[in-house]
Image (tube, rainbow, N blue to C red):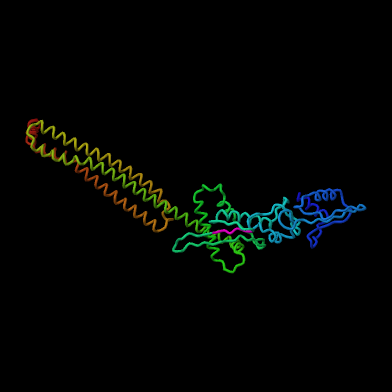
Amino acid sequence: MFNHIVELYRIIGRPALSQAGSFGYSGTPSTQLQILIKLVEDMPSHYGEMMYHRVKSGVTSFEFTPVSSGENSFFNDFATLIQKTPSLGCGKPLTNFYIITEDWSSNESVINAQNEKILKTCKLIKDLTKIAVSEHLQTSSYNLVFSTPNGNNKPPKTMVLQTKISPKILDFDIKKTSLIGSLASEENKGRIHLEERRAILNGAICEALDALPEDIPNRFIALLEQWDLILDSYWQNFQIYIHSFSFEKVRKEFAQAELDYGTKLSSAFSDIAGKMLALPISLIALITLHKATSGVEIFVTSLGLMMATIILVGILLNQLLNIQRLNSSLSISFENLTKSIKTYPKNLQKLINNAKQSIDSQKLVVHCTIIVFTLLSLVPFSGALIFLMERYAQSWHEWLLINFHAS
């Protein structure tokens, strides 16, 4: 219906409004004008008021007073619209209005740049209410509470922002508001780091408000004027947070890899230690072998010592292969984690390098320990072999003389 009023105003030549805010016409009407007059005359009062309508001697006269504020209003310009529309401070734009100097209606398909600024500001206000720590709705604005957390030896700050709109928003263009929209959207509620990103933006806005002079008349407009600086501060702080998060994640992965390696290595050595307890018993068997008198005793004891050596060496070889698998797995993990080591902070690089040195030292100890255990495992077999050689050296010598010297 509102478009009929605009069309009527245009068809009579867009006359200047009277001091009472009305426009009129007197003349011979066209068929289209008569139809529009009838349509407007029958409209409800919240669209405006037809003060009079007379038809005399083929001359039609009428005077119509459009609404001067709120929905279905005629405004001289966008600055007047802002001044007469307090609901904009609550993020509520008008849907039906006409701007006289622009000859532009909100129902037009053509986009008006100044109206876009108003719409963008209203949406920004609504989005900020979802990002602020809390919001308090007033008659013509919100009181938004922003805060920054305690950190870096700085006390926490809490600032209150009243979203008052003024015509100054028409003098500059607010850019990059899509970020606020994405942070405020409920569809993104489950996204990773969303709450942290909101907190970072909270802090950036709070810092900007804190830097404003105390006597500034409209803090919200001043905030919008330096919106680009606020977003730059947000992105810088967000990058610092992401890098800190990533570095902390890498540090934890290194610590976990080191812990897993140590745990599995400890388990492998515990298994080896349990098996190596058979070694002292084997060494005692050497005494039994030394005291043996019959051939059966000597044979059985020697065979048992040889079997003990074979079993211990087999166990050590199996554990050595297991440890090699652990080393290979750890090397792959470290290779993945150290690909971008030069981009890490120096303290993290130092931590990683120290961890690698510690593990390399542990690998050397493991290698030396396996060698020692292997040598000890050969003691029973070596002892039995030495005993047999001493015990039967004379017999072997005589046998060799008889069988080889004779020939």
Q: Which residue lies at the image location 80% right of the left edge and 50% below the top edge?
A: 40
Instruction: Compare residues 24 and 53 and report the one nearer the observer.
Output: 53
15 within the magenta span: no
144 within the magenta span: yes
Q: Which residue lies at the image location 12% right of the left edge and 32% below the top edge?
A: 299
- Residue 382 placed where, x, y %? 15, 40
* Quadrant assignment for the C terminus: top left
Instruction: Compare residues 377 and 210 and report the one nearer the observer.
Output: 210
**Left or right, residue 137 beside residue 33:** left
**Left or right, residue 248 beside residue 306:** right
- Residue 259 placed where, x, y %? 34, 48
**Left or right, residue 14 beside residue 168:** right
**Left or right, residue 206 beside residue 372:** right
Counting labels gives: 0
- Residue 278 placed where, x, y %? 19, 39
Please tell me in which quadrant of the rendered image residue 22 appears.
Answer: bottom right
In the image, residue 163 sits, relative to residue 194, either above or below, namely: below
Q: Identify the main secondary structure in magenta.
A: strand
Instruction: Compare residues 386 and 75 and report the one nearer the observer.
Output: 75
- Residue 377 placed where, x, y %? 20, 41
In the image, residue 313 sits, relative to residue 60, either above or below, namely: above
The magenta span reads 140-145
